[in-house]
Every structure is written in C-alpha cells, then in structure tokens.
Image (cartoon, rainbow, N blue to C red):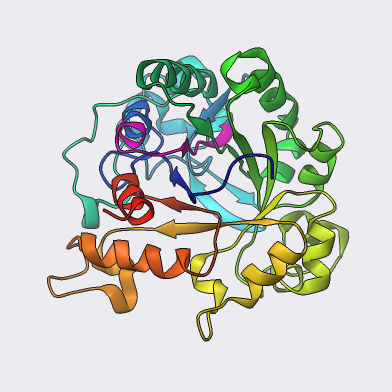
C-alpha cells in the first residue's frame, strides 16, 4: 500500500465506540482526539440514496426508532444476505426522517446508556467534513476507512452505493489527499472498484475476511464455493492481491505459532497489508487477557497487551473500539 503503515495505523472502529454510541460524529471526534489515524464509517443507504453511517441497515438496536410511534408501521421483515431480519431499515427512510432519530448504545449491558438520545445519525459527507476540520485543527492528516455494507442487497433494490461513495470521496478536497481505505466483505464490488481506482494513490481497497468457513455473500448467488478460508491460503491471497491492497482478518484468525503468523507472512509475501479487527477493552472480549470484575469491566492494560501481542506478528494496522489504548499500544506508553 502507498499509505504509510509504520508504525502500525490505529483505526477508530465506528469511532471511539467503547466510549460513545457508535457511528456518531461524537464517537468519531473522540476517536480523533484519542489518537486514531483513521476513522471507520460503515455505510448504508437511505431511501433517497444518501450514504449514512450505521453498522447495519436494520437500526432498532442503535437508534430510538422502536419508540417513535410515527414510524411504527415501518417495522417489517426482510431477507438480508440470506438471513431473515425483522425491524426498521434505513432504506425505508428518507435522510430527513432518519435525522429525527437519536443514537443508542448497541451494547448497553457492557457500556451503559449514559449517551443514549443525544446524538444524530451522520452522513458520509458530515464525517468527511469532520475529518477535514479536525485535520486542520490538529495539524495531522486523518483518514477514513469506509465499509460498504451489504453491497449485493443494496444494488438489488436499486441503491448502488459504490458510485455515490466514489463521488463523495472525489468531491471533497480532504479525501482527495487523505488516506482512505475502502472495505468490503464481498469480492465483486472490490474487483469493480479496482478498475476505477489506480494503485498507488490515496484510495486503497481492503478485502475483509469473515470466519474461514463462511462465504462472501456475492459468491453465494453465483454458486461459487469460495470461502474466506480459501482466501486465507497462499493461492487465495495472491488472487486477492490482484484487486485489493490489503486483507482484513479477525485477529483471532492470525493463528500465531512460535511468534509468527502464517497468514500475516503469506499476505505480506503476496504484497498485501494486514489490517485486523477488532480490539475491545472489556473483559468480555479479552480472552486470556481478561481480569476479575465481570464481563463489562474494562481492563486497559490487558487490552494493550493483547494489541501488542498482535503487533509483534507484523500486522500493519488494526481496528479498535478504544483508540486511546491503541495509540498507547503502538507508541509504547
């Protein structure tokens, strides 16, 4: 990748989502304040084709929509990437309607509800503007790592997101120069984007990798049997390198042995950067690095050790819900 990766980049996963409701301007601002090099908006579409930041297009778990009587009739059941889901969906709302909603904490049992009801759903344009303003204020270039969510589904309902994403990135002076890492768990949209994005510029492509036994959803419809595990093998990594600049595995899939990770080493040999997800500070997510205090208890030192264990494998960047801890892990504080 042409984007500098040393020292390893810290990416604010949905913002500083351990501290503020995810995918809000306040979460992104906090991530930047705490030292994130890039911030990550997961992108879905409104009915009128505006890209907004939500982890899923079903929003009952991250907004107050279920408590809004004026939208009660919008509750419905859909099949998204092969799974039946019931709730409220961004594509059934205009931007103006979504702007009346307020964000809620997605993991209240771990992170509380102190900030519920305070923050709005941001658009991609608003997030880019925030990154530009903060870059100017802080004297450092803050990048973005937008993920295109459910691209096959959205294309199937006439809301193709890739064109709108590229148009937004190319329209703003900030994203014409700042690092931008475009992510997807699917393959076909990244291949298509490769034909429109020159290598070596500020826009890079990241092939996200789900669990080894799972298949990218766009391959399900074609009958292809490719799994993410196949993409993690040497031949698969070389194929990924033909269209992407990096892979994005879960940190648990690095499978270290004797201080090395085959996946990291073979990805680097194929010319791919390795950007792993996601480090979180609560005991619930820390495994062997947890301590006493129950699943919701934070363990900052344990989280830093967990990140450093994976930095030692040679990863190039990582997503974290608490960028302040990621910054400390990288900088050695």
Residue farthest along the left direction in this orientation: 293
Magenta-drawn stretch contains 32: yes
Residue at horizontal 87 percent and vertical 58 percent from the top: 222
Q: Is residue 88 left or right of residue 190?
A: left
Is 296 inside the magenta-drawn segment?
no
The image shows residue 126 at horizontal and vertical percentages of: 47, 18
On the question of residue 267 being in view, the answer is yes
Name the spot of residue 296 as percent of width and height, x first. 20, 62
The answer to which of 105 and 236 lies nearer the viewer is: 236
Left or right: where 223 falls relative to 295: right
Q: Position of residue 145 (x, y in %)?
A: 56, 38
Tell me which residue sits at (78%, 62%) in the image: 270
Please provide the residue range marked out in magenta.
Answer: 30-44
* Rendered location of residue 244, percent (x, y): 76, 49
On screen, 284 above or below 116?
below
Q: Is residue 273 left or right of residue 255?
A: right
Which residue does the image show at 57% across and 18% down from the upper left? 174
């Amino acid at each position: 990748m042409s984007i500098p990766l040393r020292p390893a980049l810290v990416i604010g996963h949905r913002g500083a989502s351990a501290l503020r409701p995810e995918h809000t301007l306040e979460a992104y601002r906090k991530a930047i304040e705490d030292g994130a090099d890039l911030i990550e908006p997961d992108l879905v579409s409104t009915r009128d084709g505006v890209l907004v930041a939500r982890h899923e297009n079903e929003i009952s778990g991250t907004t107050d929509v279920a408590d809004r009587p004026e939208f009660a009739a919008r509750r419905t059941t859909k099949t998204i990437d092969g799974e039946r889901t019931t709730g409220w969906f961004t594509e059934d709302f205009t931007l103006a309607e979504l702007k009346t909603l307020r964000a809620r904490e997605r993991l209240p049992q771990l992170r509380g509800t102190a900030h519920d009801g305070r923050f709005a759903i941001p658009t991609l344009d608003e997030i880019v503007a925030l990154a530009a303003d903060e870059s100017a204020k802080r004297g450092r270039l803050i990048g973005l790592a937008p993920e295109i969510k459910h691209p096959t589904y959205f294309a199937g309902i006439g809301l193709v997101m890739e064109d709108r994403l590229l148009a937004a990135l190319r329209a703003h002076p900030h994203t014409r120069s700042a690092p931008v890492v475009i992510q997807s768990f699917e393959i076909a949209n990244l291949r298509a984007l490769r034909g429109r994005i020159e290598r070596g510029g500020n826009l890079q492509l990241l092939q996200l990798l789900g669990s080894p036994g799972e298949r990218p959803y766009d391959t399900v419809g074609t009958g292809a049997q490719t799994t993410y595990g196949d993409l993690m093998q040497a031949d698969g990594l070389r194929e990924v390198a033909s269209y992407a600049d990096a892979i994005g595995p879960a940190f648990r899939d690095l499978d270290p042995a004797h201080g090395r990770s085959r996946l990291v080493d073979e990805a680097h040999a194929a010319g791919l950067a390795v950007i792993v997800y996601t480090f979180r500070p609560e005991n619930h997510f820390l495994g062997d690095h947890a301590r006493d205090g129950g699943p919701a208890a934070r363990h900052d030192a344990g989280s830093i050790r967990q990140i450093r264990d994976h930095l030692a494998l040679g990863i190039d960047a990582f997503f974290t819900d608490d960028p302040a801890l990621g910054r400390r892990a990288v900088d050695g504080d």
